[in-house]
Image: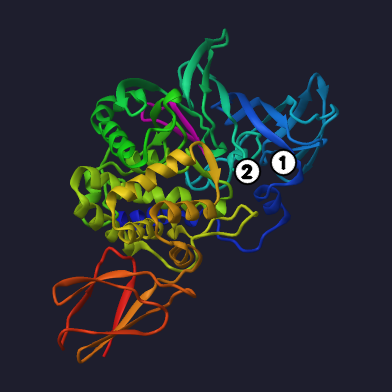
Amino acid sequence: MKNKILLNIAFLFIAGTLFGQKQNFTKQDTLRGSITPERIWWDLKKYHLDIQVFPETKFIKGKNTVTYTVLKPYNVLQIDLQAPLKITNVVQENDTLEVISEGNAHFIQLKKEQIINKVNALTVFYEGKPLEAKRAPWDGGFSWKKDHNNNHFIATSCQGLGASVWWPNKDHMYDEVENMDISVRVPSNLMNISNGKLKQIEKHTDNTTTYHWTVKNPINNYGVNVNIGDYTHFSEKYDGEAGVLDMDYYVLKDNLEKAKKQFKDAPKMMKAFEHWFGKYPFYEDGFKLVEVPYLGMEHQSSVTYGNKYANGYLGRDLSGTGWGLKFDFIIIHESGHEWFANNITYKDIADMWIHESFTNYSESLFLDYYYGKKAASEYVIGLRKSIGNKSPIIGKYNVNNSGSGDMYNKGGNMLHTIRQLINDDEKWRQVLRGLNKDFYHKTVTTKEIEAYMSEKSGVDLSKVFDQYLRDYRIPEFTYAIKGNKLEYKWNNAVEGFNMPIKVTINGKEKTLKPAIFWKSETLNKENTSLKVDANYYITSKKLE
């Protein structure tokens, strides 16, 4: 019973309940969640994050050099950094700059004239004891742990709370750097693994070592990570859609043999997802799985793993169908985010469903690729039992507010329903691949994704999105059979909702087109039996 309770609690967390449902918003929420005047005038080009980590004191110290292009003249630049970390200095071309702080937003007063199209840089120095994550990865911060051999085992995670919980940056998702360097100095008995490719290992005379990593692709802020431990490394080459991909694995030394067996799911994942979604988006940066002291997270090209080398979610099947034990949940789910989150990224966290709904459905598509469509359908349908339907999936805009945790399982079932509406699996696959091609390395809005899917599928999905994303109710197919007459309509539906569904009437499949008003049609005979296709995420009610 205890294990079952813990699993349920864990699943509530992963369903997004900790990403913020508060409705009383403050100025700090606006400064964090909106594109302020102090953000909009400059475009990110590059970060070089250069820090030292002191495990014994849980202290970090370093700097971030921010390179940007001037879009219009302005003399105040916003950088975000969360307490208790403190900015100690900001320098631009040898000038020390004044910083006016308002909570976690820091407004740098520039001396240099900011000329349109000019590329400038400034360096932000900072230090302190960053917030310690208590329930990583859902609450954010540093995880300061020890492995079984009493070595330090440290990692960062920060979705929702924001990357500024541990490093200074432009902490809004609309603007991504084009590339990034990450330098992390640690005690020499440990390694640091971050995003991208390892460029250099620099040893120092004080028994510390700096690991220099470089990221050649655009990267979102929360995707940047630091992972420190007594790691060992193994790797393989994957012959993929865009050539040979480096796949690297960093695990604690004691777990090497378990990892070599369990991580066989990684190339299987790559094969399935390149089929469904198109080429892996970060060939230049490679793909990594990195063991961490928490469950796992979708850090770009540095996917973190803590699923205890077991299939399912910590050894359990969240769908209750048995299919969830055919794969390692964290490897499949978090890697799916490389396409939906890291390649296609929301501009505002209110649209977080773009990350989580598609990635939730990627689990089903993995099963589809290896076990068939029936297995995939059973899995996604099995996840419905954990849907709450208490509030909309889309959150409030411009205040760093995500919507309901239903964006996972309900969002996945919405996409499964849309697959039925398109009714052409190859077209459905091309829509998914098209999303990753046409929005390659871009930040997007819900409206853009909705319009694209309707256009490319040839099906008007606008009311479907309104129903499942902006309303918390599940549409109810209400019907009555009176003699040889069938009457039916949608209840619990948004205005204009007219989604067609497949039903089986006396063993024969038929498509009905209900509306929010009663429709009727004559049947071939009386005492008709009717069954709704379970692949549609709806409820049904027969009136007597």
Circles 1 and 2 in contact, beta carbons < 8 Å: yes
Q: Is residue 407 visible?
A: yes
User: Which residues are the magenta region?
Assistant: 144-158
Could you tell whether 392 is left or right of 520 in the image? right
Q: Which residue is mark 2?
A: 172
Could you tell whether 38 is left or right of 151 in the image? right
Q: Main secondary structure of the magenta part?
A: strand
**For the N terminus, which image quadrant?**
bottom left
Q: Position of residue 409 (x, y in %)?
A: 37, 57
Return the residue nearer the eye: 118 or 12: 118
Q: Is residue 13 visible?
A: no
Q: Is residue 535 above or below residue 127?
A: below
Whether residue 149 appears in magenta in the rendering, the answer is yes
Q: Which residue is mark 1?
A: 39
Q: Residue furthest top?
A: 205
Packing grade of label 1 (10 A; few <14, some 14-19, many >=20) is many
State the count of labels.
2
Q: Please name the residue shown 36% across and 20% down the image.
A: 232
Q: Position of residue 208 (x, y in %)?
A: 54, 14
Q: Please name the residue shown 67% across and 50% down the image.
A: 34
Q: Position of residue 8 (x, y in %)?
A: 35, 57
- Looking at the image, is mark 1 or mark 2 earlier in the sequence? 1
Q: Position of residue 492 (x, y in %)?
A: 43, 77
Q: Please name the residue shown 39% across and 41% down the image.
A: 334
Q: Secondary structure at mark 1?
A: helix
- Mark pair 1, 2: CA separation: 9 Å
Return the residue nearer the eye: 476 or 433: 433
Return the residue nearer the eye: 149 or 217: 217
For the residue marked with disc 2, what is the amino acid?
A: His
